[in-house]
Image (cartoon, rainbow, N blue to C red):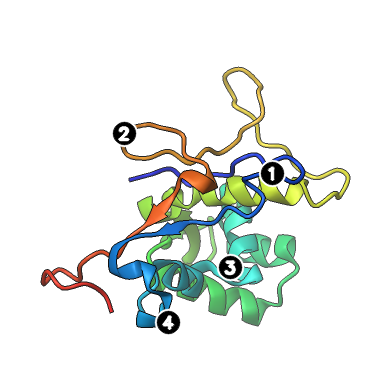
């Protein structure tokens, strides 16, 4: 599996300014297919494509676990936070874990699942891209071991760094040996 990443922008006017992903095979005929309903990007966005989902995930990555704290720190209403957390649990990014303070009823906290941890490079990429939008201040993620800022890089399964103009897309099969769609 490749690594989610950002590549540096191409310089002003040059061969990479119009670079897009190269479509190969049957996928190259853009009028022969529609991505709606089977696109992996579309499916991912159905899970985490809302502002509320991503800021809840941000707070959980920052160590938030309990509902009251998550709702307060995100600025979401309790209804929106509850609905989105329920969906993130149903989609497998979070799990609810019981806890009980002395003399109180059992409550639940939210913790990352493996699928939720795998979203981390996307969070880093969004933070890195968001920095380029020009707002002052904010958070910088750094390597705890050396203090250097984190960045993301697109790599193929063989370990080569891949830029946008060096990327190709192809149809995969649906498990029955037939292409999608």
Q: Which residue of the protein is positioned furthest toward the right in this rendering?
A: 136
Please state the horizontal and vertical placement of residue 80, each as a whole percent of the image. 63, 79
Alpha carbon separation for disc pair 2 and 4? 30 Å
Alpha carbon separation for disc pair 3 and 2? 32 Å
Mark 4 residue crowding within 10 angstroms, few (<14) / some (14–19) / many (20+): few
Marks 3, 4: nearer the viewer: 4
Residue underneath mark 4: 36
Please state the horizontal and vertical placement of residue 56, each as a whole percent of the image. 61, 62
Give the left or right position of residue 75, taking residue 127 as reference: right
Q: Which comes before the other along the chain, label 1 or label 4?
A: 1
Please state the horizontal and vertical placement of residue 114, each as a whole percent of the image. 36, 50
Marks 3, 1: nearer the viewer: 1
Q: Which residue of the protein is positioned furthest toward the left in this rendering?
A: 176
Marks 1, 2: nearer the viewer: 1
Q: Residue at x 67, y 50 (%)?
A: 17
Image vertical order of residue 9 relative to residue 24, above or below: above
Q: Which comes before the other along the chain, label 1 or label 2?
A: 1
Q: Which mark is residue 53?
A: 3
Q: Which comes before the other along the chain, label 3 or label 1?
A: 1
Alpha carbon separation for disc pair 3 and 4? 22 Å
Image vertical order of residue 158 relative to residue 115, above or below: above
Q: Quadrant of the N terminus?
A: top left
Q: Quadrant of the C terminus?
A: bottom left
Under tag 3, what secondary structure? Answer: helix
Residue underneath mark 1: 14
Marks 1, 4: nearer the viewer: 1
Under tag 1, what secondary structure? Answer: loop
């Amino acid at each position: 599996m490749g690594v989610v990443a950002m590549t540096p922008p191409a310089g002003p006017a040059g061969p990479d300014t119009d670079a897009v992903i190269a479509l190969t095979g049957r996928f190259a005929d853009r009028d022969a297919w529609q991505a709606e309903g089977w696109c992996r990007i579309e499916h991912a966005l159905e899970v985490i494509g809302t502002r509320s989902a991503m800021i809840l995930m941000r707070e959980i990555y920052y160590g938030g676990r309990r509902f009251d704290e998550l709702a307060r720190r995100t600025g979401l209403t309790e209804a929106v936070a509850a609905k989105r957390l329920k969906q993130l649990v149903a989609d497998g990014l979070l799990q609810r874990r019981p806890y009980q303070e002395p003399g109180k009823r059992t409550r639940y906290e939210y913790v990352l699942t493996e699928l939720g941890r795998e979203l981390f490079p996307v969070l880093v990429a969004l933070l890195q891209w968001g920095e380029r939008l020009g707002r002052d201040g904010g958070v910088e993620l750094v390597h705890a071991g050396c203090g250097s800022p984190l960045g993301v890089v697109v790599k193929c399964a063989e370990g080569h760094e891949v830029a946008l103009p060096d990327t190709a897309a192809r149809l995969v099969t649906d498990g029955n040996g037939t292409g999608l769609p």
